[in-house]
Image (cartoon, helix red, strand yellow):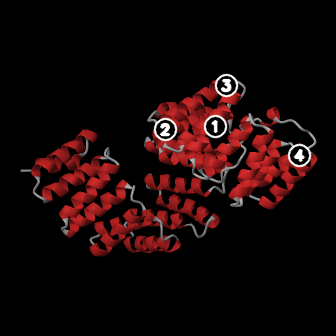
Amino acid sequence: MALLATSVSAGPVLPFTSQDQLDTEYQNSAVTPAFKQGVSALEQQDLPAARQAFNNALATDPTFVPALIGLAGVANADGNDKQAQQYLQQAQQLAPKSALVYLATGRYYISRQQFAQAEQQFLLAKDVQNHSGHAALISLGELYLRDAKQADKALAHFETALAKDANNGYVHYLAGVAAALTAKPELAKQYFATAIRLSPQNAMPLHAMARLMTEAKQYEQALAQLAQAIRLEPANVTLLLDQSDLLALTGNYAAANEALDKAEKLAPKLAEIFLKRADIAQAQQQWRRALNLYDEAIALNAKLAQAYNNKAWLLLTQKQDLHQAKATALQAVSLSAGSAPFYDTLAMILLELGDSTAALTAIDDAIRLEGSVAEYHYHKGLIASKLKQSALAKTALQQALQLDPNYTPARDALKQLP
């Protein structure tokens, strides 16, 4: 469920969130309009307008801490690290025990990829808030959600926050993401369903529910959720790309391309659109068109590893230039060394080229990265068989069948071993 978490961590890191309860902690009607203008401008990345609005707030009340935090956010977004720290230090001097200052400082550290320091600041905010608020719990949960291995920890924090405020749709959404990452799909569905009910105008939980249903191969239900999300955000390119993927999975290639047409109007130079068009062409056995589209995707984004991998796989399956296939697969691996499918593609190309020893190394890399995929163990069995390592081949094929008892190719290959 890695894709579910992307929307949690995407975008610029702002010093405030809607969960911070600013109106409760700081009340000053004289500066509120200017401050709110600054927050709005900062959210829209209009840094000059945000800076002016926060300075206007401080001109009215030099001790208004949220405005100092706002200026720190402006400086950070502008790449002025030293000035951002100065504003945060001023805020801390004025309010040394303020949860808001701790939260803003933690978010500053997140923007600098200093996650341990961010956690420390959020824990300090949590101690200050205690029973009075839940922004620190949410911030901690979001921090832990950046690492799938800490998703259970994130879920615990979100559930504690929901105990304080059960009607917070955003936290239900986050809890759903965490539940999905901890292999609890039914619990995730419950959280997403509640988030959709509480926040009917928010496309995020609908999108997350669609992805969850896609993983469960509930394609029609997933398409229905995506359609609702797109009605809310018709200009959301990511939603349109996911819709295209789903339609292609169900064999509706014409509709899949129509979704890509809409996406291309919004983002005409987005390489991923050409990649998906190429995948559809490959599924329709339009080999030359697919190769041309992969090349177009790569021309738009030379670091798009998936395009290299998919092109390499097409060259392999069509027995075209295998040396070009190898070079293309190696490029994919070099761009994304943590992707198991890319090593699998490389392994099968090396096997076809007759370099079974190198193929075994590549497939072992794929299994090291993602050991629960039956196909990888099946491919290892084929490679080991080619190397006349019957015992290794048998073990690999049996492992494939253990992971997927209905994996017929592995069963057939096992029967053919001496």
Q: In this view of the protein, can residue 181 be seen by the observer?
A: no
Which one is nearer the viewer's eye here, 98 or 282? 98
Q: Are marks 2 and 3 in contact (CB under 8 Å)?
A: no
Q: Are marks 3 and 1 in contact (CB under 8 Å)?
A: no
Question: Looking at the rendered structure, which numbered label has been put on residue 122?
Answer: 1
Which one is nearer the viewer's eye here, 367 or 418? 367
SS under mark 3: helix
Q: In this view of the protein, can residue 288 be seen by the observer?
A: yes
Near mark 3 (Cα within 10 A), the count class, few <14, some 14-19 or many ≥20, is some
Mark whose residue sits in front, 4 or 3: 4
Question: Looking at the rendered structure, which numbered label has been put on residue 62?
Answer: 4
**Badge 2 or badge 3: first in the primary sequence:** 2
SS under mark 2: helix
Mark whose residue sits in front, 3 or 1: 1
In the image, what residue type sits under mark 2?
Gln
Q: Marks 1/2: CA distance? A: 16 Å
Q: Marks 4/3: CA distance? A: 34 Å
Q: Residue 187: x, y in percent?
A: 51, 30
Question: Looking at the rendered structure, which numbered label has been put on residue 164?
Answer: 3
In the image, what residue type sits under mark 1?
Phe
Q: What residue is at 72 percent from the left and 35 percent from the top?
A: 99
Q: Residue 137: x, y in percent?
A: 63, 33
Q: What residue is at 11 percent from the left and 54 percent from the top?
A: 389
Q: Residue 64: x, y in percent?
A: 85, 42
In the image, what residue type sits under mark 4?
Pro
Q: Are marks 4 and 2 in contact (CB under 8 Å)?
A: no
In the image, what residue type sits under mark 3?
Lys
SS under mark 1: helix
